[in-house]
Structure formats: C-alpha cells, structure tokens
Image (spheres, rainbow, N blue to C red):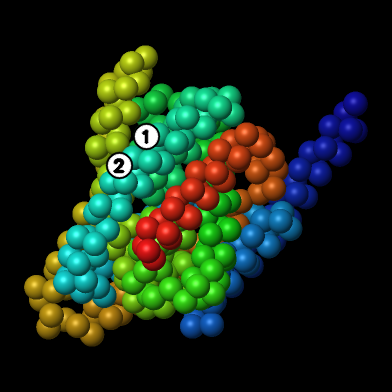
Amino acid sequence: MGIKNVQIFHGLVGIERKFKKYNWLYSIIICACLLPFMSPAIALFFGLMLSILGLKHENIHKYTSKILQASIVLMGFGMSLSTVILSSKAGFFETVVSVTSVMILGILLGKLFKVEKNIALLIATGTAICGGSAIAAVAPILNSKNYQNSFALIVVFVLNAVALFSFPFIGHKLGLSQETFGNWAAIAIHDTSSVVGAGAIYGEKALQVATTVKLIRALWIIPLSLVIAFMNKNGEKKSIKFPWFILFFVFAIVFANIFPGFESSYAHFSWLGKRGMVIALFLIGSNITISEIKKSGLRSFALGIILWSVIAVGSLFFLTR
C-alpha cells in the first residue's frame, strides 16, 4: 500500500511538472497576440486547441476578466463621442424589445424543458444582456449555487465561441453594412468579448458600433436585477454587482473628446485595448473544456441554443427589414 501511495504521489508531481513545463506556450501566444497577424478568431482557436490538448496554465485564467475590462476601457479612448450618442439612440428600442422578449421566453422554455429555475434565469439574463457579466451580477440576487452558475456560464461561453466564428461569415454572406452588423452582434451575441471580437473581424466601423451598443446594453443589468430581486420572493435582498468598468469606458470616451490634444496617446491606448481584447479571447478559449460542456446538461444547452437562435434571427430580421 505504501509503494502505491508513493507511485500516486510521483504521478501527481509529474502531472504538475508537465503543466508547468507548457506554461511557456501561454507566454509565447500572449506575446503573439500583440502582433497584427493574430486576429481575435485565431486567438480563440489557439486557446481552444490548448484546452483540448489539456495544456492548462496554472493560474492565469483568474486575470481574464480584468484584462477584458481594462481592454474595453482603453478602447474607449479611440471612440468618437458623436458615434456613441448616435448608436445609443439607434439601439434603445431594440434593446427594450430584445431584453424583455428573451427573459420571458427563457422563463417559459425553462419550465417546458424542466430546467432548474435559477439556471434558466441565469441563461436568459446572460443571453439578454452581456453574458458572463450579467450572470455574475444576477447570481447573488438569486442566491444560486456554484454548479448553477457554472452551467449557465458554460452554455453562454460555448455559444459565444460559435458566434465569434459564424457571425462575421453570415454577415458577409448577407452583405450586411458595418453599422447593421455592429448592432446585430451587440444584440445577438452574449458576452462583450465575443461581440468585440466579431466586430473586429468584420471591420473598424462595426467594431465601434458593436462595442458601444453592447456596453450600453450592459447598463440594463441594473433595472433587470431590481426586477429579478422583486420577483424572487424566496430570496433575500442582495446588493447589485454593478460593472464599474462601463463607467470608466464612458469616462475614457468623454475625456478623449474634451481633450483632443493628446490624440497620439489615445491612439496608443486604443491599440493596446484591441490587442488586450485578443489576449482575453485567447484566455477564454483556453478555459473551455469538453468535460465541462458535457456536465452542463443537454436541456440547459437546448434552452440556451433556442434563446440564442430566436434573438439572432429576430434581431437580424428587425434590423434589415
């Protein structure tokens, strides 16, 4: 028995050393993400490949959210205030309709598919607003369990990966304009990172519109959280986890437009934000595993896919009619 324990111990040590051995791959790819040839789609693909091969970094994934949020703020320095205002006005009505419709449909489908109430609400919230950020904001209000949060996040992240690759292809096939595609991506793709990635693949104008509309949609976390807290009779009153990076994003836009004399510096900040977004997409891809996808359950995925399909087709029809 003692010999077996020693063998197991050495085996675990060997696995640990193996993971540490391949950590240098992450450093190389992250550096490559700063180069022009590394597109958001390629970065995500590399991340998925490392995940499939089982080459996980020990602790780098805990920085993904911070890198993503910092990148979004930096990108704000390269945006026009007039474009932001126009995009906000143009997307307001679509946002009201899509958020309301997705939440109602998500609740109904959750009951139909017999998906746990919290999981259904989390998936619907992530689909309606801004993916993982919305799920993180609503989870404390629902007092949901860790596995319920994980199920919802996995469904959203997997569909994000599909959208990042498929939306630009569909947009080009349909001949969508930069503005139309930007609005479509912001409405129909869950997470901010994938919205920005899809916009970057499609074009510079699409990137600006998609990023602006998506971040404005993210503000709907506040009223939606209040409604969920009111309707969740069994839950205790919880504070809303507000995504403060959105305010910093708005501040960056306003600051750059009030003080245009630092235009060259703003260009560098914007470039760093775009490259940081590519790094974030790589890390997101490398953190998605096949085993986690299987654990999330077919009914949860069916719910997420139907919600996503409805909002994708419905918003595209509405924007192109």
Q: Is residue 82 left or right of residue 228?
A: left
| Residue 4 image point, x, y percent | 89, 33
Q: Secondary structure at mark 1?
A: helix
Q: Where, by quadrant of the figure, is residue 86 drawn?
A: bottom left
Q: Is residue 260 left or right of residue 90?
A: left
- Neighbours of disc 2 within 10 Å: few (<14), some (14-19), many (20+): many
Point 39% across, 75% down: residue: 177
How far apart are labels 1 and 2 at the CA level?
8 Å
Q: Which mark is residue 138?
A: 1
- Neighbours of disc 1 within 10 Å: few (<14), some (14-19), many (20+): many
Q: Are marks 1 and 2 in contact (CB under 8 Å)?
A: yes
* Quadrant occupied by the N terminus: top right
Q: Which mark is residue 176?
A: none
| Residue 270 image point, x, y percent | 31, 74
| Residue 196 image point, x, y percent | 41, 65
Pointer 2 residue: 221
Position of 140 relative to 187 (above/below)? above
Point 27% across, 58% down: residue: 91
